[in-house]
Image: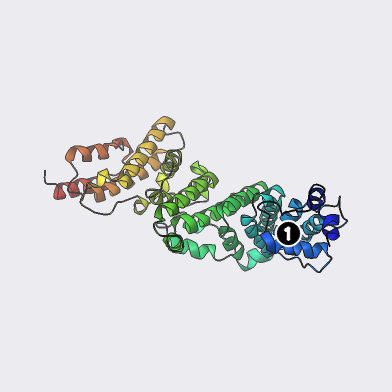
Amino acid sequence: MQFPLLSKCGYFKKALLDSSDVELPERFAGGAETFEMVALFCYNSPLPFDPFNVAVLRCAADVLEMTEDYSRSNLCERTDLYLNQVVLQSWDDTLIVLQKCQTLLPWAEELLIVSRCVESLAFMACMEILDPEHKKDWPVTTLQATLTGPSWSCELVKEMASRDLWIKDLIALPFEFFKRIIGSLRRQGMKEKYVSPLVVFYANKWVLSKKTHKFWENTDEKDRTDDVNNRVSEILQGILDLLPMGEKASRVIPAAFYFSLLSRSMSLNLSDESRIRLQDQVASLLHLAQVEDFLLPEKGDYSITSTPEFEAMEKIVSIHVSAKNEAGYSGSTPLSASSIVAELWDRYLTQIAMDPKLEPGRFMELIEIIPMADREIHDHLYRALNTFLLVSKF
């Protein structure tokens, strides 16, 4: 009864040289159920491969050394053929195998199953973008229409992401797999106006969506809010690595999106490096924002200027002014952009001026963050001053 196993499994053949009592390797891929399928294969019983079992069988075959050195058309060879010739030719099958790989690490990584799936999905996504019939029936989703739109809307962006099924599939993947697909899309030449929206849609689903966080909190054990926040923090930090930065971002991603990330980061354990990077990016796009995008804390029994939201906005405007001064008016931040920022800041200060705890000296400091030369009009500054005088008790 041992002969079929010995003839096809190098692991058993070697182990039985020293002992007649052999156990499966520790942490055997797939456990007893998978070994039962392997045994059926060894005894020449029908073993239909499918996207749900091929990855675990490939991993098990490697652990048991079921190579061509021991038998022709052995399990390693058979599963590899099925992966390459069947699975990787189908979008749905490749997705299934990649998702199954989550529980098969590090075996699936070492056997290049993950990387093969990633490259295949990226290639098929590029083909989807290039398909003239697809573009004729429904234009490929970009964020061009939102570049000058109102404040960020999670529901609107969610609806945009749902227009293409392949986009929905990609943003449902674990972040480590998604990150690698984004890298492959860029290597394979997909234009940034198509790649960046995928990153935005992913962030919208896993970082910005309140529904996602409630789902995680309800499905996890009690008192797991910190764990959920840590998970979201890790994704957000990874998202920042995938997003284009600087002026390049303004051509494909709305400024309101970065403000939304900044707002979300207020309640997360974001690293100092990531927080600074996000603030710098918001500062570089400040002239493309609307005052509705600016972070405004909820009213309470505290001074607005002492809140993290306001401190972040003050820091960002200071970064913008410093960058403009270093570059000069001939640099990347022209006078017209500076005047836009000045108007935005004055309109924002009109809301801040409603804080009865705001002291005159502090209010003047906030006004003077923006050089007077940057203000082409002063209407909003006068309105902010008038509001402060009406509310102030000094």
Classify residue 38 by image quadrant. Answer: bottom right
Secondary-structure class at tag 1: helix
Q: Residue at x 54, y 55 (%)?
A: 197
Classify residue 73 by image quadrant. Answer: bottom right
Q: Residue at x 31, y 42 (%)?
A: 311
Is residue 308 among what the camera can see? yes
Q: Please provide percent x and percent y for residue 120.
A: 70, 55
Q: Residue at x 65, y 49 (%)?
A: 106
Q: Amino acid at mark 1?
A: Leu
In the figure, 291 relative to 274: above or below?
A: below
In the figure, 323 relative to 141: above or below?
A: above
In the figure, 327 relative to 163: above or below?
A: above
- The one nearer the camera, 48 or 147, is 48
Say how many tags the image has: 1
Q: Is residue 311 left or right of residue 39?
A: left
Q: Please provide percent x and percent y for residue 158.
A: 49, 63
- The one nearer the camera, 281 or 183, is 183
Q: Residues within 10 Å of mark 1 (few under 14, many from 20)?
A: many
Q: Residue at x 46, y 34 (%)?
A: 331
Quadrant where the C terminus lies?
A: top left
Is residue 140 among what the camera can see? no
List the residue tagged with mark 1. Answer: 57
Q: Is residue 31 left or right of residue 215?
A: right
Q: Please provide percent x and percent y for residue 64.
A: 76, 53
- The one nearer the camera, 262 or 13, is 13
